[in-house]
Image (cartoon, coloured by chain):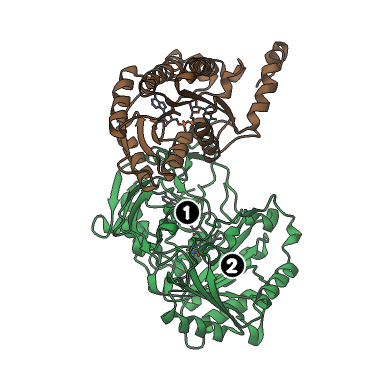
C-alpha cells in the first residue's frame, strides 16, 4: 500500500505509521517541522518501511502547503492509495475562551485546515480512480458539551464533512474513514485526568488500521466509547446543562 | 512517583513528551521506565514553590540510524529494551549487554551502566556505548564519546542522570547466530561449589549466573542453581523464532502477609528441589533465559503496601570466598530472607566514573521493607562491605547513608568535579543524590 500520513511525529499518528511500516507499506510523511519529520522517517525505515521514507513540510494552519506536500508525496510514491490525517490541535475550553488567538488557530487547524487538506487529497485520489481517505475527528464532535464547546464544534464540522464525502464519492471508489477516538493517553491529553476508559495510542492504532483495511466509514475507539456516546447523544438538554461532562 | 520497590514515594510533577529535547529542558532529573528500585529516578521531595519536575522519556523512542553491516544503532533515550528485542531478535541482532528485565530504557541502561550475565567477558553496557547526546543543565546539547568530551562521557555512564539528560545513545548491536539460547543449569550444594562453578564456566560460557537459597545455612550456605548459556547455533535452534508469550499481571497490591518468611522459605526450597535432576540442558527462548521475572507484570505489588528493596553489592574475590560468605551469613543471621538472591562473578571495572561493578562477586538480595529493621540491616551490610573493600549498586539502593557511600566510593570526588564543571548551580539532582551525595534538597 502507498500511504501518506500527516501527523506521524506524535501520539496516535506515530503508532499508526509504525504499524504501516512494520507490515512493509510504502510511506511518505508530512508535518510542520522539517527536521522532526525527517527523524520520524528514519524511525519508520528501520522498523520496516521500504527506504527511503520521504517527507515534506505541511502545516494545517497554512493551506498553501497542502498541494505541494501532496504533490511531493504522489511523485515519490509513484501514486497514492491511502491518505491519513491524524494531525490536530487541542486546547481546553477555558484557555480558548480567554484567548481568541488560540481559539482561531485551533479552529483553523482542526476544521478549515483539515477539511481543505482532505479536499486536496480527495481530488488527487479520485483522479487515480479512488483510494482511502482517513481523518481523525473525535467523540467531542458528537454532542455539544461544556468542556469541549469550541474544539467539539470543529470536530463536529469535520465529522459532518467526512460523512458527506463518503456519501458522495464512495461509489466513485473513494472510501472515507472517520475515526472518533475517545480519551487516549497522548501528549494532547497530558494535562488532563484520564477517565475510566482511557485508551493507549498503540491499541487505538491497531483498531484504526483494521478500519482502514476494511474501509469502515466510522469507528469509535476504544470501542466502548460508541456506547458511551450513544448514551450522551440521547441525554436530554436539561441534563446536559446540569452535568459537567 | 516511586521506583520499582515502591519505596520511597515522592509527590512531584512528571512530564512526558515525544520531543525529548523540549521535554527534558529545565527538568531536575530524567526518568525512564522507573525500574531502578529505590530513589534514583525520583526528584527531591518538593515544597511546591519550586518549579522542579521529572522528565519521563518513554515517549521519546525513535530509532534514528541502523547500519545493517556493522550493527551500529542510534536511538532516542526513551526507547525500551522490550521494543529493541521485539524488532531486532528475529533479524539476528541483540544488545551487547542486557539487564535482567527488558522494561528498561536506553537512557536508564546508560545512567545505571547496567550489567548482565556476560559481565565476566563483556563488562557493562557503558563499555559498548559509542556516543551519547546529552542536554546539560544549562540547555546545551553536547555530543560526547571517548574522543569528544571524554570526561563528561565517563561521568554520564553510570552517572545516574546527574550529569545531564541523555537524549540519544549510539552503540553497536551484536549479530547472533540464532534467536534462541542453549542453556545448561546445575544444582549446587554450597557456596564454594557455586563460586568454583561460576569460575569454571567463565571460560566456556559467555553467560553465567547463580541463584542462591538465602535460607540455607552452615555447610549448605550458598546452595542454589548455577545457570549457563550461549546463543544456539542455527542447526541446534528451532526453525521458527521464539513466540511472544502472553504475560500475566498481578491485578492489585497484595496484603503484606502474603510474602512472609514462611512463604519465601517455601518458594526457595521448592525452587531448589524443582531442579531435581542435578543437571539440565536444552534450548530456551531468550525471554525466559534473560527475563524470567518479566513473565509476571507488576510483580512488585506482591510485596504489599510496605514496598521492598534490593541490596546489591560487589565484594572482592578471595581463595576461600570469605567476603561473599560473610555477606550471605550476615544477611541470614540478621533475619534477612530473600525471595531472590543472585550471585555473579564480575569482570573488569568499567570506564564509567561511578560504574558499579569491579572484579569480584556480586550478590543481590530482595526483601520487604520493615521501617526500623531494614535500615539497620542495610547499615550492617554496608559496614561489612566497606570492611571487605566492596561497594553497592546505586540503582537498587534506598537506605545507604551518605558517610557509608563516601567510604566505599573513592571515585566520588572526580565525579563531583565533573558535575561541578557542567552544572555549577547544582540544578540536576535526585532524591538519591540529596540523600547520598550531599546535594541541596
Ligand atoms: C526485575 C529487574 C531486574 C533487573 N536486573 C538488572 C540486571 O541484571 N543488571 C542491572 O545492571 N540492572 C538490573 N536492574 C536495574 C535496572 O536495569 C536499572 O535500574 C535501569 O537503570 C532501569 O532503567 P529505567 O529506564 O527503568 O530507568 P529509571 O529507573 O527510570 O532510572 C534509573 C536511573 O537512570 C536515570 N535516567 C533514566 N533515563 C535517563 C536519561 N534519558 N538521561 C539521564 N538519566 C536517565 C535516572 O535519573 C535514574 O538515576 C533490574 C531491575 C529490575 C526491576
Ligand atoms: N488524544 C485524545 O484523547 C484524542 C481524543 C479524540 C480525538 N483526538 C484527535 O486525534 C488526533 C490525534 O491526536 P493525538 O492525541 O495523537 O495528538 P498528539 O499526540 O498531540 O499529536 C498531534 C499531531 O498533530 C500534529 N500537528 C498539530 N498541529 C499541526 C499543524 N498545524 N500542522 C501539522 N501538523 C500538526 C503534531 O505534529 P508536531 O510534531 O509538529 O507537533 C502531531 O504529530 C487529533 O486530531 C486529535 O484531535 C485525540
Observer-nearest of A243 and A70: A70
**Residue at 75% across, 55% down:** B255
Q: Is residue A240 above or below residue B4?
A: above
Q: Is residue B411 above or below residue B318?
A: above
Q: Mark number for residue B281?
A: none
Q: Nearer the viewer, mark 2 or mark 1?
A: 1
Q: Position of residue B415 (x, y in %)?
A: 36, 60
B239 or A180: which is nearer to us?
B239
Which chain appears green? B
Are discs 2 and 1 located on one and the same chain?
Answer: yes
Name which of mark 2 and mark 1 comes first in the sequence.
Answer: 1
Q: Residue at x 57, y 58 (%)?
A: B294
- The letter of the brown chain is A
Give the answer, above or below, for where B24 lies relative to B413: above
Left or right: B206 with respect to A178?
left
- Left or right, residue B125 beside residue B404: left
The answer to which image quadrant residue A225 occupies is top right
Question: Which residue bears the numbered disc 1?
Answer: B86
Q: Position of residue B195 (x, y in %)?
A: 52, 82
Residue B333 falls in image quadrant: bottom right
Q: How busy is the neighbourhood of tag 2: few (under 14 within 10 Å), some, or many (20 plus)?
A: some
Q: Chain for mark 2?
A: B
Q: Is residue B165 visible?
A: no
Question: What residue did someone put label 2 on?
Answer: B378
Residue in the foreground of this view, choosing between B441 and B347: B347
- Rendered location of residue B290, percent (x, y): 51, 65
Per the image, label 1 sits on a secondary structure element best described as helix
Q: Secondary structure at mark 2?
A: helix
Camera-nearest residue between B302 and B402: B302
Amino acid at each position: 500500500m502507498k500511504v501518506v500520513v500527516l501527523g506521524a511525529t506524535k501520539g496516535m499518528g506515530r503508532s499508526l505509521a509504525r504499524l504501516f511500516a512494520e507490515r512493509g507499506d510504502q510511506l511518505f510523511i508530512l508535518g510542520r517541522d522539517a527536521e522532526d519529520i525527517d527523524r520520524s522517517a528514519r524511525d519508520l525505515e528501520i522498523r520496516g518501511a521500504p527506504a527511503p521514507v520521504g517527507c515534506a513540510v505541511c502545516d494545517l494552519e497554512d493551506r498553501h502547503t497542502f498541494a505541494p506536500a501532496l504533490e511531493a508525496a504522489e511523485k515519490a510514491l509513484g501514486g497514492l492509495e491511502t491518505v491519513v490525517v491524524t494531525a490536530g490541535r487541542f486546547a481546553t475550553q477555558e484557555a480558548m475562551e480567554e484567548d481568541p488567538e488560540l481559539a482561531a488557530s485551533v479552529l483553523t487547524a482542526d476544521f478549515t485546515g483539515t477539511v481543505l487538506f482532505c479536499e486536496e487529497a480527495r481530488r488527487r485520489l479520485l483522479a487515480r480512480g479512488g483510494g482511502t481517505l482517513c481523518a481523525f475527528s473525535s467523540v467531542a464532535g458528537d454532542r455539544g458539551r461544556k468542556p469541549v464547546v469550541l474544539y467539539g464544534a470543529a470536530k463536529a464540522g469535520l465529522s459532518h464533512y467526512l460523512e458527506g464525502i463518503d456519501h458522495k464519492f464512495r461509489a466513485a471508489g473513494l472510501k472515507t474513514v472517520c475515526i472518533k477516538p475517545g480519551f487516549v493517553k497522548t501528549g494532547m491529553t497530558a494535562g488532563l485526568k484520564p477517565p475510566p476508559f482511557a485508551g493507549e495510542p498503540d491499541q487505538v492504532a491497531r483498531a484504526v488500521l483494521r478500519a482502514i483495511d476494511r474501509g469502515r466509514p466510522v469507528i469509535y475507539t476504544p470501542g466502548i466509547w460508541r456506547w458511551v456516546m450513544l448514551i450522551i447523544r440521547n441525554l436530554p438538554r436539561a441534563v446536559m446543562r446540569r452535568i459537567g461532562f | 512517583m516511586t521506583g520499582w520497590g515502591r519505596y520511597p514515594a515522592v509527590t512531584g510533577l512528571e512530564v512526558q513528551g515525544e520531543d525529548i529535547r523540549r521535554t527534558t529542558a529545565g527538568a531536575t532529573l530524567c526518568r525512564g521506565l522507573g525500574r531502578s528500585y529505590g530513589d534514583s529516578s525520583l526528584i527531591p521531595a518538593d515544597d511546591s514553590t519550586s518549579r522542579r519536575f521529572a522528565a519521563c522519556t518513554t515517549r521519546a523512542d525513535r530509532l534514528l540510524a541502523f547500519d545493517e553491516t556493522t550493527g551500529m544503532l542510534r536511538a532516542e533515550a526513551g526507547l525500551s529494551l522490550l521494543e529493541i528485542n521485539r524488532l531486532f531478535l528475529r533479524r539476528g541482532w541483540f544488545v551487547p549487554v542486557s539487564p535482567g528485565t527488558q522494561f528498561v530504557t536506553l537512557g536508564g541502561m546508560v545512567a545505571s551502566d547496567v550489567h548482565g550475565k556476560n559481565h565476566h567477558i563483556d563488562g557493562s553496557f557503558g563499555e559498548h556505548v559509542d556516543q551519547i547526546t546529552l542536554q546539560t543543565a544549562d540547555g546545551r546539547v553536547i555530543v560526547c564519546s571517548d574522543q569528544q568530551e571524554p570526561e563528561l562521557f565517563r561521568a554520564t555512564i553510570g552517572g545516574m542522570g546527574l550529569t545531564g539528560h541523555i537524549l540519544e545513545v549510539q552503540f553497536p548491536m551484536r549479530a547472533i547466530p540464532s534467536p534462541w539460547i542453549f542453556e545448561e543449569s546445575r544444582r549446587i550444594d554450597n557456596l564454594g561449589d557455586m563460586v568454583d562453578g561460576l569460575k569454571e564456566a567463565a571460560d566456556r560460557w559467555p553467560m553465567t549466573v547463580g541463584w542462591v537459597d538465602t535460607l540455607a545455612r552452615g555447610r549448605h550456605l550458598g546452595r542454589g542453581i548455577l545457570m549457563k548459556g550461549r546463543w544456539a547455533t542455527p542447526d541446534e535452534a528451532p526453525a521458527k523464532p521464539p513466540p511472544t508469550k502472553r504475560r500475566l499481571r498481578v491485578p492489585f497490591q497484595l496484603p503484606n502477609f502474603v510474602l512472609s518468611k514462611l512463604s519465601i522459605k517455601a518458594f526457595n526450597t521448592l525452587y531448589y528441589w524443582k531442579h531435581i535432576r542435578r543437571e539440565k540442558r536444552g534450548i530456551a527462548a531468550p525471554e525466559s533465559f534473560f527475563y524470567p521475572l518479566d513473565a509476571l507484570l507488576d510483580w512488585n505489588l506482591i510485596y504489599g503496601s510496605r514496598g521492598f528493596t534490593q541490596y546489591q553489592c560487589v565484594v572482592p574475590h578471595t581463595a576461600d570466598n570469605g567476603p561473599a560468605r560473610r555477606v550471605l551469613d550476615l544477611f541470614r543471621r540478621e533475619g534477612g530472607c530473600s525471595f531472590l538472591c543472585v550471585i555473579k562473578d564480575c569482570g573488569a571495572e568499567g570506564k564509567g566514573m561511578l560504574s558499579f561493578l569491579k572484579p569480584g562477586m556480586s550478590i543481590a538480595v530482595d526483601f520487604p521493607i520493615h521501617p526500623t529493621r531494614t535500615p539497620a540491616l542495610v547499615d550492617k551490610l554496608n559496614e561489612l562491605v566497606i570492611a571487605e573493600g566492596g561497594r553497592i549498586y546505586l540503582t537498587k539502593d534506598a537506605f545507604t547513608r551518605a558517610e557509608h557511600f563516601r567510604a566505599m566510593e573513592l571515585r566520588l570526588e572526580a565525579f563531583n568535579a565533573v558535575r561541578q564543571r557542567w552544572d555549577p548551580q547544582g540544578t540536576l539532582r535526585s532524591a538519591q543524590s540529596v540523600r547520598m551525595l550531599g546535594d541541596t534538597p
